[in-house]
Image (cartoon, rainbow, N blue to C red):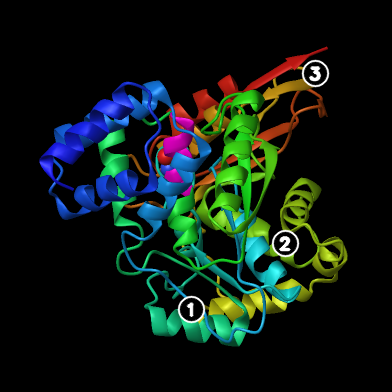
């Protein structure tokens, strides 16, 4: 895109005019090639933040970002290529259960996942609690595991949607992250580069979620479904509550253990229910309860170099119990505070290059609506000598009771 054309695109967006596909493609190409300066790209993002984008523009932005890097494809896999994306939360181990269960139901699940940041966990960090598990498979290996097992969960290969990496970093610097069209294009561009037939989105709301309120989550979900569908992929969304953590565990190894319990037909009902509602197949609850997906999980773990029978890494932490100091009904079990507690113990990371501790975290003894008596267990805090006092204060802050 030449200087003159770019000036025109910026001015048109500034003045709330609708850009065409060609203009948006030119902008994204220029961002990736470096012919558009950071200042120009930042101005574009600010204009979009203020003026918004039509669905047509957001579809064009999503497509251009999807095509800015490698596109994965899965020929001859003998099933629909499906995946889930979650907007992130606390104790969110859904992917670990969903991928093998959906594969058991006939889907083919090439799940490219990410790492945790701040108070939210990341699927790759959880999986790396399994000794030997590799999350850096290259494309030929991904193809082989998908063909043999029906699912994999791995990190990004090569360069998937590089435009998103550049634009997301600029959005962070320019306070333009919370824009529905920009979030929509960012999330979908990475997922659509996986070569999917169908995508389901778990859009969370509440204190531990990216979107604080149900209305904001609904707005994002609607946009993701319209734009994903507009970009040619069958797209659905489920809203889920992240005002308290999902399930009873927060922390990498602890969450893997809870996911395995669910795959074996046990675990907390709310986890099984969310997984099944995301898959949307009426057979899912029965197949999950039968434990059949656990066999597939074991096959996936082995195919990715892990030992499904081994003790999880980092287990062996010291345990400190927090007990209720009064009788009452739990009226708050705040996801953000519990997520922060896990973070200060070392389960999460502040920046991408920080290491995580796989064993630390929390097991919750009481959740919203539970009646507790003074002395009952609220949380078992697994720690490794770091952040315990702060974590305990956060656990106390997380809970509220009434009579
Ligand atoms: N997650 C993403 O991947 N992109 C956003 O813009 C926001 C959340």
- Foreground pick, 211 / 77: 77
Tag 2, which secondary structure?
A: helix
| Image quadrant where residue 169 sits | top left
Tag 1, which secondary structure?
A: loop
Does 386 sit left or right of 333 as displayed? left
Magenta stretch: helix, strand or loop mostly: helix
**Label 1 to label 3, Cα distance in Å?**
47 Å
The residue under the point 35% across, 69% down is 157
**Vertical placement of 314 versus 250: above or below?**
below
Is 80 one of the magenta-colored residues? no
Does 251 sit left or right of 386 as displayed? right
Farthest-out residue, top? 403
Q: Are marks 3 and 2 in contact (CB under 8 Å)?
A: no
Tag 3, which secondary structure?
A: loop
Does 248 sit left or right of 210 as displayed? right
> According to the image, label 2 marks what residue?
261
Callout 1: few (<14), some (14-19), or many (20+) C-alpha neighbours within 10 Å?
A: many
Ligand 1 in which quarter = top left
- Foreground pick, 267 / 175: 175
> According to the image, label 1 marks what residue?
304
| Image quadrant where residue 363 sits | top right
| Badge number at residue 327 | 3
For the C terminus, the image quarter is top right
Start and end of the magenta stretch? 179-187
């Amino acid at each position: 895109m030449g200087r003159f054309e770019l000036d025109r695109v910026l001015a048109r967006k500034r003045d709330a005019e609708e850009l065409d596909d060609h203009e948006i493609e030119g902008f994204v190409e220029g961002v990736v090639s470096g012919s558009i300066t950071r200042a120009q790209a930042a101005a574009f993002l600010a204009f979009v933040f203020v003026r918004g984008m039509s669905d047509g523009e957001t579809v064009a932005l999503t497509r251009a970002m999807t095509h800015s890097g490698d596109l994965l494809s899965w020929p001859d896999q003998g099933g629909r290529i499906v995946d889930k994306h979650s907007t992130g939360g606390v104790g969110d181990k859904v992917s670990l259960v969903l991928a093998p269960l959906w594969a058991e139901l006939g889907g083919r699940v090439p799940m490219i996942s990410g790492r945790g940041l701040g108070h939210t966990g990341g699927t790759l960090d959880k999986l790396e609690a399994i000794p030997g598990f590799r999350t850096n498979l290259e494309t030929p290996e991904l193809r082989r595991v998908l063909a043999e097992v029906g699912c994999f969960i791995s990190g990004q290969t090569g360069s998937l949607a590089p435009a998103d990496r550049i634009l997301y970093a600029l959005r962070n610097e320019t306070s333009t992250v919370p824009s529905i069209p920009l979030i929509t294009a960012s999330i979908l561009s990475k997922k659509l580069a996986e070569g999917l037939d169908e995508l389901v989105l778990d859009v969370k709301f509440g204190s531990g979620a990216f979107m604080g309120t149900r209305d904001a989550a609904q707005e994002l979900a609607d946009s993701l479904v319209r734009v994903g569908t507009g970009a040619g992929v069958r797209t659905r969304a489920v809203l889920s509550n992240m005002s308290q953590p999902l399930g009873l565990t927060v922390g990498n190894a602890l969450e893997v253990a809870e996911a395995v319990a669910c795959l074996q037909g046990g675990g907390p009902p709310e986890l099984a229910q969310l997984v099944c509602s995301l898959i949307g197949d009426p057979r899912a609850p029965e197949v999950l309860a039968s434990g059949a997906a656990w066999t597939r999980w074991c096959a996936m773990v082995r195919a990715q170099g892990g030992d499904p029978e081994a003790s999880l890494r980092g287990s062996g932490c010291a345990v400190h119990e927090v007990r209720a100091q009064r009788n009452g009904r739990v009226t708050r079990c705040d996801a953000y505070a519990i997520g922060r507690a896990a973070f200060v113990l070392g389960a999460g990371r502040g920046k991408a290059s920080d290491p995580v501790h796989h064993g630390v975290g929390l097991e919750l003894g009481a959740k919203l609506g539970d009646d507790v008596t003074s002395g009952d267990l609220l949380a078992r805090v697994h720690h490794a000598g770091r952040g315990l006092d702060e974590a305990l204060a956060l656990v106390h802050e997380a809970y509220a009771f009434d009579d």
